[in-house]
Image (cartoon, grey):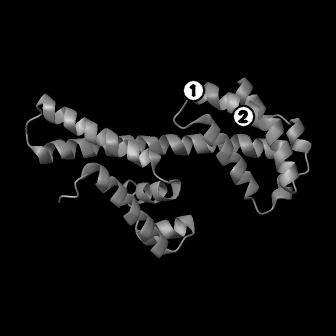
Amino acid sequence: MSKDEDNIRSTSQADVLPIAGSAALSELYDCLAEELRAYLTRLLGDGPPHPDDIVQTSFEKLARVADFDKIQSPSAFLWRTAQNTVTSERRALAVRQRHIETVKREYYEEKGAGFDPKRVLLAEVEIAAVLKRIEAMAANKREILLLSRLEGLSNAEIGRRLKVPTSTVRKRLAAALRELDAVVNPTGER
């Protein structure tokens, strides 16, 4: 058993904290965040996903638990949540990478049979600009865009998953697509 697996299974000082409110959560954060971040940095390096994002997500999920005080081992909950989040993020990254490869292939086929260096370079630059824009996009719009375009969910399914109205999904998706269109089509030509 590795040291990291030991951390997940062992009872730490954080497990005896009374989790009942923001003060206790803050104390738990002070107790565990650095250790969890160090483990994730060893596992992921600088990401993706970024270790700080995983730590934040893990504590956020703990804070959202309805029966906060019924969690027997808050530290085990955080460690397991972090590992599950890493797995989910890696899967999502793999899906995005496959999608990028598909888009590249379709883009090249659409632009013509030739794969001359100039076309390839222009396509790579355009794809990089789109990816950069997606990364810079507001999280709520980016999440909806990825659920729609990569996972193929309908607006209603996205709304149920994110617990937002379908009209909100439509508006955010349209805004995200407008942002991407501005990157691909800066002059507004069709």
Q: Which residue is mark 2?
A: 36
**Picture layout, residue 132 above or below residue 44:** below
State the image coordinates of residue 142 (x, y, percent, origin top left). Answer: 46, 54
- For the residues marked 1 and 2, what is the alpha-carbon distance in whole angstroms? 13 Å
- The type of residue carrying mark 1 is Gly
State the image coordinates of residue 7 (x, y, percent, origin top left). Answer: 77, 31
Mark 2: which secondary structure?
Answer: helix
- Locate residue 39 relative to residue 14 in the image: left or right: left
Mark 1: which secondary structure?
Answer: loop
- Residue at image coords 14%, 31%: 118
Check the picture and name the quadrant holding the C terminus: bottom left
In depth, the one of 36 and 81 nearer the eye is: 36
Tell which residue pokes out farthest to the left in this image: 113
Residue 189, image quadrant? bottom left
- Residue at image coords 30%, 54%: 182
- The type of residue carrying mark 2 is Leu
Residue 4, image quadrant? top right
Q: Which residue is mark 1?
A: 45
